[in-house]
Amino acid sequence: MSATETTARVPPSVRTSPRSRSIWLWQLSLAAVIVILTLAIVVLAPEQIAAPTTAAGIALILVFTVMALILPWDRIGRATIAVLPLADILAIGLIAYGDDLRFGYLSVFPLAWLASHFRSAGSSSRSGSSRRSSWRMP
């Protein structure tokens, strides 16, 4: 057998786009943190899990994670992708609502995702005028 015959070939349907991998990594990172924090809540403050907003927020993050793994992101428009991190922010808001544990900081994950995915959307042209500031420090 030659070297080309022994290497495993991945069918085209299994290959993923860089966009899909990026979405998976961001969403799975958030889901992993949510799972770890949920386990910590169960151990340290079990009454908090019984709060309807906390349970709903955790469930939504897990549902969004499954959706992120299932959806064909390379066939979805770039702007539509922003719906998932915005929905994550909403779910994090539910977790943090009426909570003494302050989980609002978890919004950093979807915000960083939006910033990295749409980093060129808000930038100005690359001309010389965009590099100079129009105001001066006193």
Image: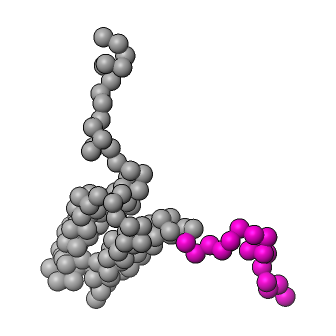
Q: Is residue 50 left or right of residue 13?
A: left
Between 107 and 41, the one lying in front of the other is 107
- For the point 29% across and 66% down, which residue is it? 34
116 relative to 3, above or below: below
- Looking at the rendered image, the quarter that the C terminus falls into is bottom right
Q: In this view, does 44 lie to the left or right of 107?
A: left
Specify start and end residues of the magenta stretch as a single range.
Answer: 121-138
The answer to whether residue 117 of the structure is visible from this angle is yes
Q: In this view, does 132 lie to the left or right of 89?
A: right
Residue 115 place in picture, x, y as percent: 50, 69
Determine the residue located farthest toward the right in the rendered image: 138
Residue 123 place in picture, x, y as percent: 62, 72
Residue 13 place in picture, x, y as percent: 27, 45
- For the point 74% across and 74% down, which residue is it? 130
Q: Is residue 97 within the magenta segment?
A: no
The answer to whether residue 45 of the structure is visible from this angle is no
- For the point 32% across and 44% down, which residue is it? 15
- Looking at the rendered image, the quarter that the N terminus falls into is top left
Between 122 and 112, the one lying in front of the other is 122
120 relative to 103, above or below: above
Give the main secondary structure, helix, strand or loop, of the magenta stretch. loop
- For the point 18% across and 77% down, which residue is it? 55
Residue 110 place in picture, x, y as percent: 41, 70
